[in-house]
Amino acid sequence: MNGRRVIAVGGSMTFPPEVARALGAAPDAVSWLPSIASAQRAMADGQERFDVVVLAPSVTDDEAIALADFAARESPATAVVLVRDTPVDGAFPRLIRGGVRDVVDLTKGRSEFPDALRRALDRTSVMRGSANGNNGSHGSTGTIVSIFSTKGGTGKTFLACNLAAALADRSGSRVALVDLDHDLGDVFAYFRAEPSRTLVEVATLEEGADSEAIAGLGTPLVSGVVGFGSRPDPRAEPLRGAAVARILNALREAFAFTIVDATSEYSDHVLAALDLSDVVCLVSGLDAIGVRHMSIAMHTLANLGVPRDRLRFVINRADSKVDLTVEDIERLIGIRVDGRIPSSPLVAQSINRGRLLWLDQRRSDVAKGIQVFADRLRSSVAPDQVVSTKRRLWARGS
Ligand SMILES: Nc1ncnc2c1ncn2[C@@H]1O[C@H](COP(=O)(O)OP(=O)(O)OP(=O)(O)O)[C@@H](O)[C@H]1O
Ligand SMILES: [Mg+2]
């Protein structure tokens, strides 16, 4: 095991030697903690640094998710692997959404067990490599841009879709477009498409999977743009922060840009996306309520630890004659607006035609506004960004 720390949690004293056998290590190479609570105590405040925590079949799904969540906050590089001796079936997506790295189903044979542990150990070394600033083992990484506003209907989805296409066009690189709305996201509707897989499937990808395997889990939308999302399901639980972080880190390896439609709420999974983003783009219309939301979001994000230089500001429907100008907004809340997109009936028209405005109305003022913002964005971000090691937003003591 070369000094890697694997700990067995739960079950009886026969469980750790079983884990050691799967690792091909001596029976006493794996230590044991009797319960989730004792594992949390050991990990609290970085007291113990485990590479992989292996949970016995006696640990419940809820306990496993609680520990994965705890590990994501206290020790993000630690992988949690759950062992089951009864069929896992429908519980698997929920566990992966909850941040569990892998579930070993012993009813399918024992050969899965060593493979799952090896993958988990590989993942930890990639994560620790990133945290040490050497950016893991996969060469260069792309830029993650989240589009966010706490006010609904400001044009986030419209901007995310068209910005993705514009960046693909202008940079000649492949762009991922992610819909974080798990219940009624409309990113795919802009392209009259449906996600072919769910985001959860990206979360289950093996660490170090090659770019083509990652891109292959998405749905090609328009030239250079690959979409990632889940079919609308009001009953679906949102992904946990740890799972979103895993998805975005995988996409970052495979795409020059990853554009995230980050919805309008500070939920756990959205905070994970904002935390990993190189750029957070705040969107507002030319109305006092939208601008108030933008101003409060600016301060909230600062309190959450998002550096000010990562923020960009886009005013949508910026030409509306409403007694408030872009310059007023700049002065009132002390920002410099990075993108101005005019209002136009062409937006609704292109949606109704099921054609992306960027492609359908390339010469329109709306497309020009998007182009200027896309070019400004490209020139302001370094091509090779190292994964941030700053405090995780979704670790806000919840
Ligand atoms: N520049 C524009 N000109 C005209 N209509 C626009 C413009 N931008 C967006 N719209 C329209 O405004 C509506 C809201 O846009 P969109 O769905 O992108 O907002 P959103 O911020 O994603 O909303 P939600 O918070 O509900 O997810 C859509 O019908 C869209 O077509
Ligand atoms: Mg939207």
Image (cartoon, rainbow, N blue to C red):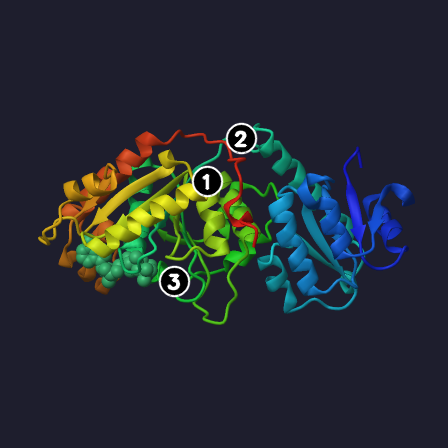
Q: What residue is pinned by disc 1?
A: 305
How many numbered marks does the figure carry?
3
Mark 2 neighbour class, 10 Å CA radius: few under 14, some 14 to 19, many 20 or more: few
Most extreme residue toward the bottom is 235
| Residue in view at x 41 percent, y 36 percent | 307
| Residue in view at x 90 percent, y 55 percent | 13
Left or right: 178 as drawn, with respect to 344: right
Mark 3 neighbour class, 10 Å CA radius: few under 14, some 14 to 19, many 20 or more: some
**Mark 1 or mark 2: whose residue is earlier in sequence:** 2
Q: CA distance from mark 3 to mark 2?
A: 32 Å
| Residue in view at x 46 percent, y 69 percent | 233
The residue type indicated by label 1 comes to Gly
Cβ atoms at labels 1 and 2 below 8 Å apart = no
Q: What residue is pinned by disc 3?
A: 185
Q: What residue is pinned by disc 2?
A: 139
Task: For marks 1 and 2, give the one nearer the viewer.
Answer: 1
Query: What secondary structure is marked by label 2?
Result: loop
Asked whether mark 3 lies closer than 8 Å to ligand 2, one says: yes
Where is residue 147 shown, x and y percent of the image? 35, 49
